[in-house]
Amino acid sequence: MPEQNIDAGAHYLSWLMQRYSHHKDQLRRVIAAYNAGPGAVEHYRGVPPYRETRVYVARVLRLFKRYRTEA
């Protein structure tokens, strides 16, 4: 069961990456859509103004940059 969850999550992230590939802020939109849904990202044309989503996007980007630097 965990393998199926990981596989589904990876496919969903891949789909989101393709969906927002033409945006300069692709990664921010993908992270926001993963948290708030693509409908909210489309509606607000970017990261929605939801506090939870903004905090989530900032945290994920911060961790991404840290792990990228360490690798």
Image: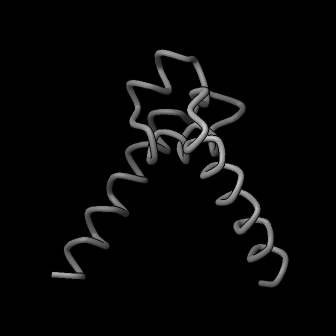
Query: Residue lying farthest front?
Result: 51
Q: Point out residue 17 in the picture as x, y percentages from the top left corner.
A: 50, 45
Residue beneath the point at 64% across and 60% down: 60
Q: Is residue 13 left or right of residue 6?
A: right
- Relative depth, front residue between 3 and 44: 44
Question: Count of labels shown?
Answer: 0
Q: Is residue 50 left or right of residue 43?
A: right
Residue beneath the point at 46% across and 39% down: 33
Quadrant occupied by the C terminus: bottom right
Q: Is residue 10 above or below residue 14?
A: below
Q: Point out residue 31 in the picture as x, y percentages from the top left corner.
A: 55, 48
Q: Point out residue 40 in the picture as x, y percentages from the top left corner.
A: 44, 25
Q: Point out residue 41 in the picture as x, y percentages from the top left corner.
A: 50, 27
Q: Quadrant of residue 59?
A: bottom right
Residue beneath the point at 61% across and 31% down: 47
- How did the renderer colour the structure? one colour
Q: Is residue 69 above or below residue 20?
A: below
Query: Residue lying farthest right?
Result: 69
Q: Is residue 62 left or right of residue 1?
A: right
- Relative depth, front residue between 1 and 53: 53
Query: Residue lying farthest left?
Result: 1
Q: Is residue 69 above or below residue 23?
A: below
Q: Quadrant of residue 4?
A: bottom left
Quadrant occupied by the N terminus: bottom left
Residue beneath the point at 55% across and 17% down: 44
